[in-house]
């Protein structure tokens, strides 16, 4: 997603938004970080319910606007763990322990 598309998504969501602005700002944060980590890592950082909630607030599907694997995916512990997973969606559901993580590393 290029910068113009990113700003367009944020502007559209902001114009339409009504309610507690902290919810929208968190959704924008997910989108911003997801640009560099990719949608697969994003699904392992956030719960599926949270991703769905934020997608509704942003009027997007993260699988449509984020890369599958971002250039910083392996900076995330979840991104590193993806290499060991045969079934991604089982990991997302929490059926494979030790994969979901919000932590990043220096390398």
Image (cartoon, helix red, strand yellow):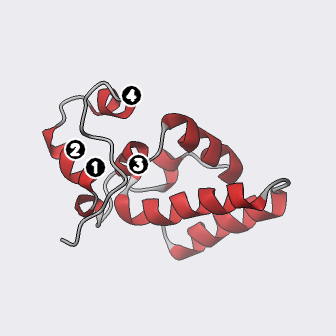
Say whether residue 96 is left or right of residue 84: right
Residue 14: x %, y % from top left: 77, 64
Of residues 95 and 65, the one nearer the viewer is 95
* Quarter-of-image position of residue 36: bottom left
Residue 21: x %, y % from top left: 76, 61
Secondary structure of the residue carrying numbered label 2: helix
Say whether residue 60 is left or right of residue 17: left
Labelled disc at residue 82: 2
The mark closer to the camera, 3 or 2, is: 3
Q: Is residue 38 above or below residue 53?
A: below
N-terminal label among 1 and 4: 1
**Labelled pair 1, 2 in contact (Cβ < 8 Å):** yes
**Residue identified by numbered label 1:** 78
* Quarter-of-image position of residue 74: bottom left
N-terminal label among 4 and 3: 3
Labelled disc at residue 93: 4
| Mark 4 vs mark 3, CA separation in Å | 12 Å
Residue at figure coordinates x 19%, y 35% from the top left: 85
Of residues 12 and 91, the one nearer the viewer is 91
Q: Is residue 4 above or below residue 80?
A: below
């Amino acid at each position: 997603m290029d910068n113009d598309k990113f700003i367009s998504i944020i502007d559209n969501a902001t114009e339409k938004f009504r309610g507690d602005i902290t919810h929208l700002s968190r959704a924008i944060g997910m989108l911003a970080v997801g640009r560099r980590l990719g949608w697969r890592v994003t699904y392992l950082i956030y719960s599926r319910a949270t991703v769905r909630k934020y997608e509704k607030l942003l009027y997007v599907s993260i699988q449509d606007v984020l890369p599958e694997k971002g250039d910083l995916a392996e900076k995330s512990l979840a991104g590193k763990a993806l290499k060991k997973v045969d079934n991604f969606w089982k990991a997302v559901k929490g059926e494979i322990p030790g994969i979901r993580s919000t932590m990043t590393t220096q390398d």
